[in-house]
């Protein structure tokens, strides 16, 4: 319990102390309009409420952390918990903040586009390839981690029919939860992004 309280205190302290330090280094401008307001197109650039922005940020930085974090903590104890907290404060939060602020200053451009603007097309292509590799790795983790957990939960003697039925019951509602028009917009946006690479 002491480690947990220490880590919570470290996260809160990191937010207020180190966050203020990083913010001072970057030099924010509260009057600058974000691309969500200057380029509002209803697809890629959409103004959101503060709770939605925080939820998106939480999901982006956490990823499978809520799944693997407790497992790592249980396996390796306080050292893993401390590593996760220190990594969030000094790496994840700072990276996400700087990426977002650089994007705002460059009209909502992605990291590869910003890299190409300042370092040339070779660096841009390298960043595109690097981003695709990272996306594939993250996709593999998001698929293999739940699949491994489900495999371990389902008894080996359970028939394939029951396993497939379970997967269909879990996956299909997730896929079709959003309206078809939103899925098509997401697909079109993804194809446009790949066409610009």
Image (tube, rainbow, N blue to C red):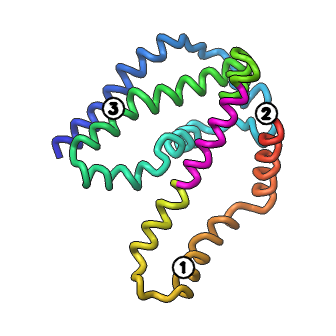
Of residues 127 and 108, the one nearer the viewer is 127
Marks 2 and 1 close (CB-CB < 8 Å) = no
Q: CA distance from mark 3 to mark 2?
A: 36 Å
- Bounds of the magenta segment: 124-140
Left or right of 13, for residue 2: left
Relative to residue 11, is residue 169 depicted above or below? below
Q: Is residue 139 magenta?
A: yes
Q: Which residue is mark 1?
A: 166
Numbered disc total:
3
- Is residue 64 shown to the viewer in this render? yes
Q: Which residue is mark 3?
A: 86
> Residue shown at 65%/71% (left/top)?
172
Under tag 3, what secondary structure? helix
User: Which-is-in-front pick, marks 2 and 1?
Assistant: 1
Q: Position of residue 139 (x, y in %)?
A: 58, 53
> Residue shown at 83%/40% (left/top)?
195
Relative to residue 189, is residue 86 depicted above or below? above
Under tag 2, what secondary structure? loop
Q: Who comes first in sequence, dot 2 or dot 1?
A: 2
Left or right of 15, for residue 118: right
Q: Position of residue 122 (x, y in %)?
A: 73, 23
Q: Which residue is mark 2?
A: 40
Q: CA distance from mark 2 to mark 1?
A: 40 Å
């Amino acid at each position: 319990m002491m480690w947990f309280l220490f880590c919570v205190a470290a996260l809160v302290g990191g937010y207020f102390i180190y966050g203020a330090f990083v913010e001072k280094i970057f030099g924010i401008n509260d009057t600058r309009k974000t691309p969500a307001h200057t380029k509002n197109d209803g697809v890629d650039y959409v103004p959101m409420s503060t709770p939605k922005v925080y939820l998106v940020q939480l999901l982006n930085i956490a990823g499978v952390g809520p799944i693997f974090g407790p497992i790592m903590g249980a396996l390796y104890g306080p050292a893993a918990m401390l590593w996760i907290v220190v990594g969030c404060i000094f790496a994840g939060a700072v990276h996400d903040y700087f990426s977002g602020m650089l994007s705002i200053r460059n009209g909502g451009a992605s990291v590869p586009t910003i890299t190409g603007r300042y370092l040339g097309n070779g660096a841009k292509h390298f960043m595109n390839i690097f981003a695709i590799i990272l996306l594939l790795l993250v996709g593999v983790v998001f698929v293999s981690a739940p699949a491994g957990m489900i495999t371990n939960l389902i008894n080996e003697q359970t028939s394939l029919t029951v396993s497939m039925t379970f997967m269909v019951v879990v996956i299909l509602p997730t896929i079709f939860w959003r309206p078809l028009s939103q899925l098509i917009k997401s697909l079109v946006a993804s194809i446009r992004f790949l066409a610009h690479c």
